[in-house]
Image (cartoon, rainbow, N blue to C red):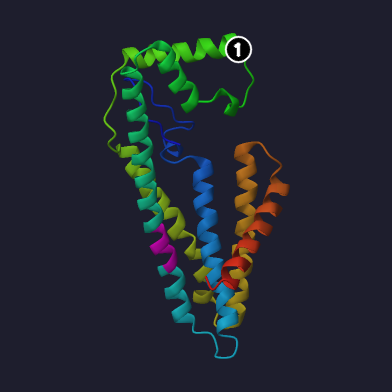
């Protein structure tokens, strides 16, 4: 998540120079989405072309085109979501500055940043001190514009890239294997393995159990693919 800044040094990103372009969890989510899209097309093609034969060229074009299109859509949605988030934070800042009393301003902060959602427990006195510190900082700081930064534009490009590039492992077997049906099976197997790898990597970042997360992600991905195919996706 990218936060609007209330002062010259309030930017908070959880990762370093390269990976702070996009959060690891968001990046893996985009990879998962791209893999599911590619699997939906390649698995679905086996059902559609079972009697008519497999048109490899059409499948390659459709797979790449679909992922690139959704990459563009996801990137645009990322930009819209980031802009909305920053504008909402700016609006909150102005409301706090214009609050008639300290009590009203503190109420806005507690509603916007509920301590119950934090991954820790705190005493009432500590919670009150935290909100009062935030209020003091907000009262003294000047808001920045809700415009997109260079890093956020790079993050949108990263979103597009991550969704689009997942089509490559899906179509590569068709470029290397002459037998279309064998290439399709290899493509599906490759994508399923990548589902496992995505879940494994997710657990590595989040501190979960890698193998368990990999199997869960694989099963979840295949379930979503089955739903998409059944609904005509």
Asked which quadrant contains residue 5, the reply is top left
Residue 57: give x, y in percent of width and height. 44, 80
Asked which quadrant contains residue 141, the reply is top left
Relative side of 107 to 125, left or right: left
How many other residues sit within 10 Å of disc 1, few (<14), some (14-19) or many (≥20)? few
Considering the whole magenta stretch, tell me its main secondary structure: helix
Asked which quadrant contains residue 228, the reply is bottom right
Q: Is residue 142 magenta?
A: no
Q: Is residue 24 above or below residue 64?
A: above
Give the residue furthest to the bottom: 52
Residue 25: give x, y in percent of width and height. 54, 43
Residue drawn at the location 60% of the way across and 12% of the way down: 124
Total labels drawn: 1
Q: Is residue 94 above or below residue 76?
A: above
Residue under label 1, please give it: 124
Relative side of 64 to 210, left or right: left
Relative side of 115 to 18, left or right: right
Task: Please state, as top left, top right, bottom left or bottom right, where the N terminus lies in the image.
Answer: top left
Residue drawn at the location 49% of the way across and 84% of the way down: 55
Residue 126: give x, y in percent of width and height. 57, 11
Q: Is residue 70 magenta?
A: yes
Of residues 101 and 7, which is closer to you in this image? 101
Residue drawn at the location 50% of the way across and 59% of the way down: 34
Q: Is residue 124 above or below residue 84?
A: above
Residue drawn at the location 52% of the way across and 57% of the way down: 33
Residue 113: give x, y in percent of width and height. 49, 26
Of residues 105 and 36, which is closer to you in this image? 105
Magenta region: which residues?
66-71
Relative side of 102 to 166, left or right: left
| SS label for mark 1 | helix
């Amino acid at each position: 998540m990218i936060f609007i800044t209330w002062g010259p040094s309030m930017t908070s990103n959880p990762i370093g120079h390269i990976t702070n372009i996009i959060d690891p969890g968001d990046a893996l989510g985009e990879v998962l989405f791209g893999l599911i899209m590619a699997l939906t097309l390649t698995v679905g093609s086996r059902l559609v072309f079972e009697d008519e034969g497999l048109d490899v060229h059409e499948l390659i074009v459709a797979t790449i085109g679909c992922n690139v299109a959704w990459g563009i859509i996801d990137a645009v949605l990322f930009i819209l979501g980031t802009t909305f988030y920053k504008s909402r934070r700016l609006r909150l800042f102005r409301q706090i500055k214009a609050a008639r009393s300290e009590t009203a301003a503190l109420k806005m902060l507690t509603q916007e940043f509920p301590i119950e959602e934090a991954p820790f427990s705190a005493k009432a006195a500590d919670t009150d001190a935290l909100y009062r510190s935030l209020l003091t900082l907000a009262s003294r700081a000047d808001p920045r514009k809700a415009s997109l930064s260079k890093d956020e534009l790079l993050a949108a490009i990263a979103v597009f890239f991550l969704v689009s590039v997942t089509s490559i492992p899906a179509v590569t077997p068709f470029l290397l294997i002459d037998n279309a049906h064998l290439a399709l099976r290899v493509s599906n197997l490759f994508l399923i393995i990548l589902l496992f790898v995505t879940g494994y990597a997710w657990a590595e970042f989040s501190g979960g159990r890698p193998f368990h997360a990999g199997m869960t992600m694989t099963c979840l991905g295949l379930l979503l693919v089955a739903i998409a195919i059944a609904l005509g996706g």
